[in-house]
Amino acid sequence: MKRALDLVASLVGLLVGSVILVPAMIAVWLQDGRSPFYVAPRAARGGGTFRMVKLRSMRILADTTGVMSTAGNDPRITAVGRFVRRWKLDELTQLWNVLRGEMSLVGPRPQVLPDVARYTAEERLLLTVRPGITDVASIVFADEGEVLRGAPDPDLRYHQVIRPWKSRLALLYARADESVILDLRIVWLTVLTIAARPRALNAVSRLVRELGGGEELARVALRSEPLREAPPPGTSVVVTSLAS
């Protein structure tokens, strides 16, 4: 049933979304005359790799700077790219990966390979399910760029205050029984967060409790308190450095 939902949703999404995607692709191309697509390797289910397709929102070769995380004020983001990222248009093209079976509509967000290399044994459970366009963690951290805004070292801040909670939230889904109803709830909450984020986060917090996430994680899901540093799941030491 999950794969059937993915196939129907990706086909319909690509057809309907083309009304928005085609003008956005042209706008990206007109800005610098380069390909409107960004295709890059991501960790696949089972630990392999696949090539994820995104609508390009950054300068050409932006991924060669050595910085993996993207802050809201990142100078690598183009003028058109800010609009693309604001409305998540770069995620629509990933429906192609869903159609191909490399991704699912709902699942842990596909990660860059250097970040996966840092996974703890517990976090590697995320590689046992197909990566997705949206999940509980991506709803809670839809403002990830703003969390990283102004950070002297965006990658360090990501590993200190975002990755620990994102992984814990994503693990709730990875451990849950496969359910089309759960997937539909997460899709609905993803749509709701665009129009009414506080309401969506309240619903996500309740869902976290239903999935056994506990009170602390449910409070994090509300995003009503400052994020605190925490160790990644499966460790007991707070990240203080990106050095191995």
Image (spheres, grey):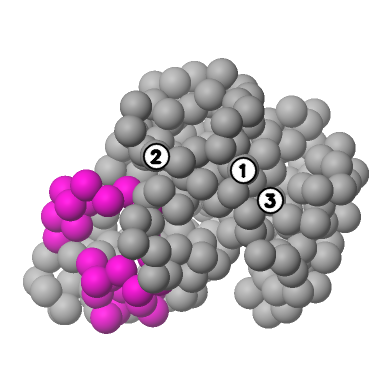
Identify the residue position indicated by label 2 in the image: 241
Q: Amino acid at mark 2?
A: Ser
User: Is 125 in front, or is 218?
Assistant: 218
90, above or below 3, in the image: below
Task: Name which quarter of the figure residue 189 lies in.
Answer: bottom right
Q: Residue at x 34, y 27 (%)?
A: 244
Instruction: Give the main secondary structure, helix, strand or loop, of the magenta stretch.
Output: loop
* Other-residue count near label 3 (Cα within 10 Å), few / some / many at <14 / 14–19 / ≥20: many
Q: Could you tell me residue 21's position as x and y percent?
A: 38, 70
Identify the residue position indicated by label 3 in the image: 136
Residue 31 seen: yes
Magenta span contains residue 66: yes
Q: Amino acid at mark 3?
A: Val
Magenta span contains residue 234: no
The reply to whether the C-beta atoms of the residues labelled 1 and 3 are less than 8 Å apart is: no
Q: In terms of sequence position, does the residue under pointer 2 or pointer 3 come before the other?
A: 3
